[in-house]
Amino acid sequence: MSAALLLSLRRLRHDRLRTFVLVACLAVPIFLPLCTGRLARGYERELAERAAETPFVAGPKGSRFDLVLGALWFRANDLAPIPWSRFEELAATGEALCIPVHAGFTAGGRPLVATTREYLELRGLSVARGGPVVGLGEAVLGARAADELGLAPGDALTSDPRELYDIARPAALKLRVVGVLAPSGTRDDDAVFCDVKTAWILAGLVHGHDDADAIAERDEALVVGRSEAGDRVAFSGALIEESEVTPANAATFHHHARDDELPLTAVLVVPRDAKAGTLMRSRVNATREWQMVSPSEVVDELLGLVLRVKRLIDTVSGVLAASTLAMFALVVWLSARARRAEMRTLERIGAARGFVARLYAAEIAVVALAAVVLALAATGAAGLLLPDLTGVMR
């Protein structure tokens, strides 16, 4: 180790507070662009990959961003539902694979996604433990949801009440966990998957109870009206509906709503070819009530806004770097003035020509290297500690 470097390290260690402040101030303008760039690239990759898996999303007219984020990342929104009858119309064309999605409820704090087995096939999801959903009241958990909730096939999971103190709302439903999905590294790892009709139970549109005649015979007070023909019976709201679907009562679950009253939050559309997709999109978008959008186009537009924000942060980082370098130069200059006597002593005891310059250069190099190492370490820590995309999309 050269004498200049040795003396520089001794000097920096002697004045620890000054050294720490200089290293921290230099590390900040290095850290900001590194961290924002790494996070932006990671989010862009995850957003683009998931959007590319889904050619189109159909839903009600309104915000394209809300529709895509709700269908692909299960974000809650205020868009009107799309009726089951509309899904059947799209599927009946035969031009595309249509996958219904209802993502308006939660269970264990995780999004409860009601869909069909085709959704798992579209996302390339496989069941690692247990089996798939085959009936009402059954649920398959994403890998991360199962780990965090501590659940396995055979356990039970209760849906979250939407409004705790509203007794007019349907009661929470006890779901049977029948399977756990293999990790996918996507938003699906955080979700709970069930059948579409299970979501309609939570919405109060599907319910289960004993046969109407048996209920009337057991407690006539629950009957508030009958049709003239006697084939229809209206019951009081005091009638207690089933809060769990079991093999014994599964056959009693039914709905009284029309198909245009059974809600979905979106329909994923996978056309058989590009021409069929273009025709379907044109027909749907020609209506006043519905829209069909490409998630890739919506995500590209969203990422454009993110990149503009990143450029603003980079500009601020540049200004901060310039002011920090100016401050650093001032500190070095003031330090040199304060250490004139020290430097003269070095020259008098025989220090070689240029030794003082090498001494200052070594100090600056050590501080700059320490700042770069600190910035890289902070960037790595930020990548581990900051929430991933699934956390941001909750």
Image: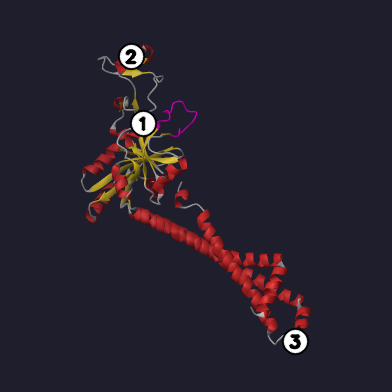
Q: Amino acid at mark 3?
A: Gly
| Residue 76 shows in the view | no
Q: Which residue is mark 3?
A: 350
Residue 253, located in which quarter of the rendered image?
top left
Q: Which residue is mark 1?
A: 201
Q: Is residue 304 left or right of residue 30?
A: left
| Residue 359 shows in the view | yes
x 77%, y 78%: residue: 342
Judged from the image, the secondary structure of the residue bearing numbered disc 1 is helix
Quarter holding the N terminus is bottom right
Q: Amino acid at mark 1?
A: Ile
Which colour scheme appears in the figure?
secondary structure
- For the residues bearing labels 3 and 1, Cβ distance under 8 angstroms: no
Label 2: how many residues lie within 10 Å, few (<14), some (14-19) or many (20+)?
some
- Does residue 162 show up magenta in the picture? yes
Judged from the image, the secondary structure of the residue bearing numbered disc 3 is loop
Q: State which region is magenta.
A: 159-174
Is 362 above or below relative to 78?
below
Judged from the image, the secondary structure of the residue bearing numbered disc 2 is helix
Label 1: how many residues lie within 10 Å, few (<14), some (14-19) or many (20+)?
many
How far separated are the C-alphas under marks 3 and 1? 91 Å
Q: Which residue is mark 2?
A: 216
Nearer the camera: disc 3 or disc 1: 3
